[in-house]
Image (cartoon, grey):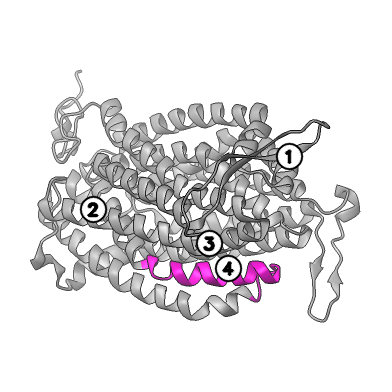
Amino acid sequence: MPPKPLKQRGEHGLTADGRLKSGKLAGLSMYAAIWTVGWPVLVDSVLNSLVGLTDTMVAAAISPAATDAIGNAAYILWFCGLFMIALDVGATALISRSVGAGRWAVAHAAVGQTMILAVTTGVAVGALLLALAGPIASVMGMSPEGEILFRQYLRVCSIDVPLMGVLYAGIACMRGAGDSFRPMRAMILVNIINLGLSWMLSGADYAVMVKGADGGLVRKVVVENPFPFDLGVLGIGLGTILGHAAGAVLILLTLVRGKTGLRLRRSRLKPHWHTMRRIVRVGFPNFLETLGMWIGNFPIILMAGWIGADLVGAHILAVRIEAFSFQPGFAIGIAAAALAGQYLGAGSPRLARRAVLICTGLSAGIMGVMGVCFILFAKPIVGMLSAQGVHLAVTPRLLEITGLVQVPFAVAIVFRQAMRGAGDVKVVMWITWITTYAFRLPLAYALSGVDVPLPGGGRLENPFKEWVGGASLTGLWVGLCAEIVLRAGMFAWRFWQGGWTRVKV
C-alpha cells in the first residue's frame, strides 16, 4: 500500500514530498534548508567569536594583566548575556513554530515584544553591571594592575549591554524565521568596526614570538600601531561598543523594512502580555539553565587563578581558540533548532528528528577535523595570537586536550540546540545542571589538584593533589573535557527517548 499523503497524516504545513510551505525555507529540500540556514550562521558565529578573540589578542599585546582583566570581564559579560540568551531562545522557538504553521501575525507580534524585552532587560542589566564593577573586581583574584583594568573595561562595557540585547534579539528573530543571511551581514559589519577600532584606539602593536640567535624566544613586532590614542583596555571596550551599535542599527532597519519576511511594526511595540508570557515561558527555564552553567563555571575561572599567576589569560585564550571549533557545531545546531521548530510546527516529528540527525553528523565531521588540527598544530596556532611567554608555555597543551573530545562536544551542542528550538527547555535545563554540578565541578577540582584559599590566609588542601602530580591547568582541562563526554551521552538519551517532539510552546 502506498504511503498516505502527508496532509492525511497530520503534517499539514508540508508539501506532499515533505517540504515546508511557509517562510524563507518554503519549497526547499531538507539538505537545502540546512545549508540555507547553516552556512550564514557558521560565518556569523565565527565572526562573533572574532569579537572576543580580537579583544583577547589586543589585550595580550598590552600585558598579561590586561589579558587577565579582559578574560575575567568576559566571564562577567557572559552573565549579562544569560538574560539575552534566554530571551532569544524564547523568541526563536515561538517564531519558528509560528512560521512553520503559517501564522505570520503571531510571528510579527513576537518580534515587537522581543525588542521591548531586549531593551528593558539590557538597560537594567547594564545599570547593575556599572554599579557592581568595583566590588566584583575585588573578588576575582587579579593583580592590582589587573583589577584597575578590569574595572575600567567593565564600566565601559555596561553601556554595551542594551546594544548587544537589541542586536542578538533581532538575530534570533530572523533565524527563527529561517533567515540567517542578514544576521551574518550584520556581524560582518560588527567585526570590521570592532577589529579596526579596538586595535586603533588601544595603541597595541601586533607581535609574535620567534626564535632568537641563542635559540630562545624573542618578541617581534609584525605590525606597529601608527595611531596616537594609546587608550589600552578602554580602547578595546570602545571598539566593541561601536561595533555592536552599528550592528544593532542594521538589524533594526532590516526588521522595519520587512526584508526577512518578519516585520517590526510600531503597533507591535506596545506590551502584549500574552505574547510576552509565551516568550518568557520558554526563555525562563533556559535562563535558569544557563545561570546554573555560569555559577558552575565561576569556580573554574577561580581555580585557574589559584593555580598560578597570569593563568586566567592562558585559560581564556584557549577558550577563544577552541570557539573556532565549536562555533561550526553551534551554527549547525542553530539550523537544527530552526528546522526542528518549523517541522514540529508543520506537524512532522519524523522530519524534525531526521533534520537533527543530519545536522549532528555534519557537526561531528567538521568539529572532528578541527580537533585534529588542535592536536597537530597547537603551538603554531597559539604563537600567531599571543607573544606572551606564559600563553605559549601553557595554552597549546590545553588545545591538544580539547581536540580529543570535539566529536562528543558536537553531539552535545546540536542535540541541546535542537531541543531548545523545539521548546524542550526544562529537560535541557535539568541535564545541564546535573552534568555541571555532579560531574564538571567535581572532576575539574579533583584533576586540577588545586588548593582552595580560605579567608585569613589559610588553604584547603586538595586531597587528590599528590595523585594528579600537583596543581595544573592541564588537569583542570582534562576534568572539563571528561564532563563533555558525559553531557553528550545524556543529551543523546533525551533525543532517542523522543519527549522533546511532544513539547508545546
Q: CA distance from mark 3 to mark 4?
A: 8 Å
Q: CA distance from mark 2 to mark 3?
A: 27 Å
Write down the quadrant of residue 72 in the picture: bottom right
Q: Are marks 4 and 1 in contact (CB under 8 Å)?
A: no
Q: Does 407 appear above or below 470?
A: above
Write down the quadrant of residue 301 in the picture: bottom right
| Residue at disc 4, secondary structure | helix
Q: Amino acid at mark 2?
A: Ile
Secondary structure character of the magenta stretch overall = helix
Crowdedness near tag 4: few (<14), some (14–19) or many (≥20) residues, C-alpha within 10 Å: many
Q: Amino acid at mark 4?
A: Phe
Residue 151 in percent (x, y) is at: 55, 72
| Residue at disc 1, secondary structure | strand
User: N-terminal of the two: label 1 or label 3?
Assistant: 1
Q: Amino acid at mark 1?
A: Val
Q: Nearer the viewer, residue 414 or 195?
A: 195
Q: Nearer the viewer, residue 282 or 2?
A: 282
Question: Which circle marks residue 233 in the picture?
Answer: 3
Q: Residue at x 40, y 66 (%)?
A: 83
